[in-house]
Amino acid sequence: MTAVMQSGSTTQTSDVREVQSTSCCVVGGGPGGAMLALLLARQGISVLLLEAHKDFDREFRGDTVHPSTLEILDEIGLADGLHQLPHGKVYGPVVSAANGPFAPFDLRRLDTRFPYIMLMHQPIFLEFLTEEAKKYPNFRLLMGANVLELVEDSGVVRGVRYQTPKAWHEVRALLTVGADGRFSRVRHLAGIEPIKTSPPMDVLWFRLPRLPEDPQVPGGALVGALGRGRILAMLDRRDYWQVAYVFPKGHYQELRAQGLEALRHSIAELEPRLASHVEHLSDWHQFSLLSVESSRCPRWYKPGLLLIGDAAHVMSPVGGVGINYAIQDAVVAANVLTKPLKAGRVQLSDLAEVQRQREWPTRFIQAVQSFAQKRVVASVLRTQAAFRIPWFVRLFARVPILRDLPARLLAFGIWRVHVKN
Ligand SMILES: Cc1cc2nc3c(=O)[nH]c(=O)nc-3n(C[C@H](O)[C@H](O)[C@H](O)COP(=O)(O)OP(=O)(O)OC[C@H]3O[C@@H](n4cnc5c(N)ncnc54)[C@H](O)[C@@H]3O)c2cc1C
């Protein structure tokens, strides 16, 4: 038995049942990986998308599709089709603070065909992208393919090895893309270490039923309630509420120890209209914990390998931009790499160019998130008093040239990304 070129394990060549080859092997069928695979497939590039799970229907990871993503889909003729699928729309939050309601921004004033955040169940969104990709014969999707090793040759990544329930398989690729999320195995195998910062909060996501007496939330379908050391944000999903309960970092075990009754009480205290809804919370399995993290890799690539999306940078949930940043990375990667992939030669400078175009928007938004976390989230979580919106924040939201900046940043990042090919 001969050992194959690999990183970090001792699998033998004889274990491999099949060796496939492709131009681009994308690891991870999340929003970033699915979008990149689709864009490359459109260009006639042979692309293999490997997804560890058997289907897209898994734990909640956010359902927001921002205006930037909708514009990107519009550019490739898919926005109308996406709108045929079940979805909701958010135009802007109304924050209920001790000194009255406050609307920090309104997406409806933006200059775009899509002045809202679409709320779509992520599995439906991912199915949509991959079904589109399947229309191209040069695209292949393998579900239940768990990538466990990199195939390397003299420091150049030449592909991956993945395991299905039945066997090991190997993929040889001109380019391997790690789009495998915040706990990226590809990143780890490549020896790339992210620089982490620790935002001051964690989030519990859960659903509450929509009851007949529930109000229609005017204009914006997102309501935030601040105060008493907790933050509650609610997204109106038409037939249910998607709720985020934000609490100080590292206190999850304490919450668990206090019990569900204490949590139900805390939610109802923050938003009294939820007093009867919380009775539906009877098991901790109804909650998804988001251990909030913010990180960025100093380098998103090495020869033969590129990282995108959460694998390259985990975004804090402030503004809910993780999905659209992963998608923007995918668009830039496709813009930059289509030609080299078609030519059969991807140079290190091509991979560096992807990072160059995406790093500053990422750094900028992370800096804004960090500011918001320190100045707003941390101070709300520290105080037991009901939160009051400072006067200067209210003033900012009234000045015409300033008031749309947050909405623009949230919708598009610091600049719009377009599909070039
Ligand atoms: C509870 C929660 C709520 C969130 N809410 C929001 C929100 O409202 N809005 C928002 O914008 N963002 C939200 N996020 C963040 C958002 O989910 C991510 O930023 C976004 O999904 C990143 O996309 P991605 O494609 O880079 O990675 P992911 O979406 O994480 O996709 C990675 C994919 O890779 C697969 N994978 C992992 N390892 C392997 C492997 N070894 N082999 C093969 N496949 C593998 C995974 O199964 C997964 O499908 C939330 C995250 C969580 C956890």
Image: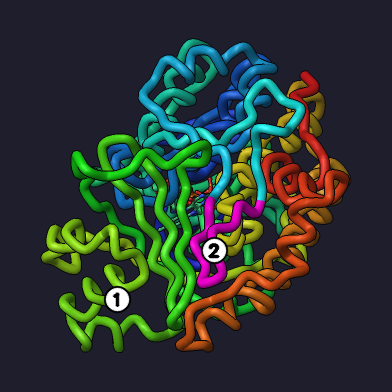
Residue 67: give x, y in percent of width and height. Answer: 64, 33
Q: Nearer the viewer, residue 314 or 278?
A: 278
Q: Residue at x 83, y 55 (%)?
A: 360
| For residue 328, above or below residue 395 | above
Asked if residue 85 shows in the view, the reply is yes
Q: Residue at x 32, y 35 (%)?
A: 238
Most common SS among magenta residues: strand
| For residue 350, above or below residue 124 | below
Going from N to C along the chain, the mark reached first, 1 or 2, is 2
* SS under mark 1: helix
**What amino acid type is highlighted by mark number 1?**
Ser
Residue 12: give x, y in percent of width and height. Answer: 40, 56
Q: Which mark is residue 76?
A: none
Is residue 4 rendered to the left or right of residue 69? left
Q: Which residue is mark 2?
A: 100
Is residue 272 rendered to the left or right of residue 184? left
Q: Which residue is mark 1?
A: 266
Residue 55: give x, y in percent of width and height. Answer: 30, 37
Asked if residue 194 shows in the view, the reply is no
Residues rendered magenta in the picture: 94-104
Judge the density around disc 1: few (<14), some (14-19), many (≥20) Cα neighbours within 10 Å.
some
Mark closer to the observer (1, 2): 2
Q: Place residue 102 in its image quadrant.
A: bottom right
**What amino acid type is highlighted by mark number 2?**
Gly
In the picture, the quarter occupied by the C terminus is: top right
